[in-house]
Image: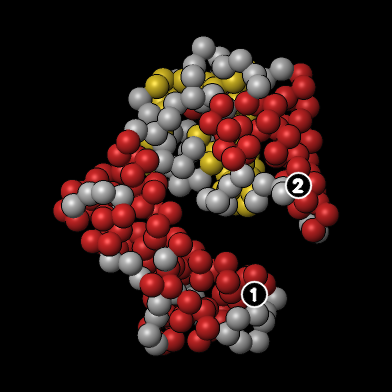
């Protein structure tokens, strides 16, 4: 049996410290789970308004467009988990994810599972804890998929949003080849000009800028999780010269790759 290949990217608690009345529309790049501890307004997922109630669980998918209006910005108290899944995911997992609604009212069992998952994430600092968190997340998503939706079906991304999400997936899997905007547009069936306009309207970035963002994110991962030298990392991201990679990385991250590796990871010698 193959365990789902989840990567938990961020988790924590959000309290809207700046007391914003609304958030601008944003294009989701990851899966998002939120457990709402208070009633504080309405969020809109792909044009579907979703009331934020105490005890509700919100679920977002890559490609969703979401914005939120807060009627009580001072009352926001939200646990969140952002995670990604390998794109070559098992069909069983795909079926589970597709059944999860945008909003579900938590019962005692779901609340207990959520608390266990958040506790494991906060306290875990080794491979066993990471495995336990992965299993907890899979169990939580499975239980969530079996719940009756809170009067809302899954809010799936539009065809345009799905095309942009597919384009991002194509970019991610071809970072070593530096795909052109035309190649990426052709992959999802659009002309280059139409695709470029659509991409920026959904993500706020041009395709070229977003490809660089993906490269820098991948570089950070490789610096922290491998002992690969800078020449090898640069080549894997289609840089002809390591000096060009180092220049882009410093511009993007505010420090050199070596400084980033030492500061964040205790230092590989590369």
- Of residues 89 and 258, the one nearer the viewer is 89
The mark tally for this picture is 2
From what the image shows, is residue 115 above or below residue 10? above
Which residue is situated farthest in the top direction here?
151
Secondary structure beneath dot 2 equals loop
Picture coordinates of residue 46, whole percent (x, y): 38, 29
Asked whether residue 133 appears in the rendered view, the answer is: no
Picture coordinates of residue 266, whole percent (x, y): 70, 76
Which residue is situated farthest in the left direction here?
193
Crowding around mark 2 (Cα neighbors within 10 Å: few <14, some 14 to 19, many 20+) is few
| The quarter of the displayed image where residue 14 is located | top right
The residue located at (51%, 71%) in the rendering is 219
Question: In this figure, which residue is indicated by the disc labeled 1?
Answer: 226
Picture coordinates of residue 90, whole percent (x, y): 61, 44
Asked whether residue 156 appears in the rendered view, the answer is: yes
Image depth: mark 1 or mark 2 in front: 2
**Disc on the earlier residue, 1 or 2:** 2
The residue located at (50%, 45%) in the rendering is 30
Picture coordinates of residue 217, whole percent (x, y): 49, 64
- Of residues 146 and 25, the one nearer the viewer is 146
| The quarter of the displayed image where residue 181 is located | bottom left
Question: In this figure, which residue is indicated by the disc labeled 2?
Answer: 1
Judged left or right of residue 206, residue 4 is right
Measure the alpha-carbon separation of dots 1 and 2: 27 Å
């Amino acid at each position: 049996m193959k365990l789902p290949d989840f990567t938990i990217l961020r988790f924590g608690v959000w309290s809207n410290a700046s007391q914003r009345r609304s958030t601008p529309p944003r294009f989701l790049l990851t899966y998002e789970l939120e457990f709402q501890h208070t009633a504080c307004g309405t969020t809109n997922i792909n044009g579907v308004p979703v009331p934020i109630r105490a005890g509700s669980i919100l679920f977002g998918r890559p490609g969703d467009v979401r914005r939120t209006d807060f009627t009580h910005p001072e009352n926001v108290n939200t646990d969140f988990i952002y995670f990604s899944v390998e794109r070559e995911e098992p069909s069983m997992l795909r079926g589970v994810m597709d059944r999860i609604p945008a909003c579900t009212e938590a019962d005692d069992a779901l609340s207990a599972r959520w608390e266990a998952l958040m506790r494991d994430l906060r306290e875990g600092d080794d491979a066993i804890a990471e495995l336990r968190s992965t299993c907890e997340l899979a169990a939580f998503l499975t239980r969530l998929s079996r719940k009756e939706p809170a009067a809302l079906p899954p809010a799936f991304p539009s065809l345009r949003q799905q095309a942009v999400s597919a384009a991002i997936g194509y970019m991610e899997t071809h970072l070593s080849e530096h795909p052109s905007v035309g190649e990426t547009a052709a992959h999802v069936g659009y002309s280059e000009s139409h695709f470029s306009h659509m991409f920026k309207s959904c993500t706020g970035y041009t395709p070229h800028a977003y490809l660089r963002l993906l490269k820098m994110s991948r570089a950070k991962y490789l610096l922290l999780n491998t002992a690969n030298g800078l020449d090898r990392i640069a080549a894997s991201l289609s840089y002809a010269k390591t000096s060009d990679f180092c220049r882009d990385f410093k511009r993007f991250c505010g420090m050199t790759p070596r400084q980033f590796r030492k500061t964040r990871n205790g230092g590989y010698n590369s």
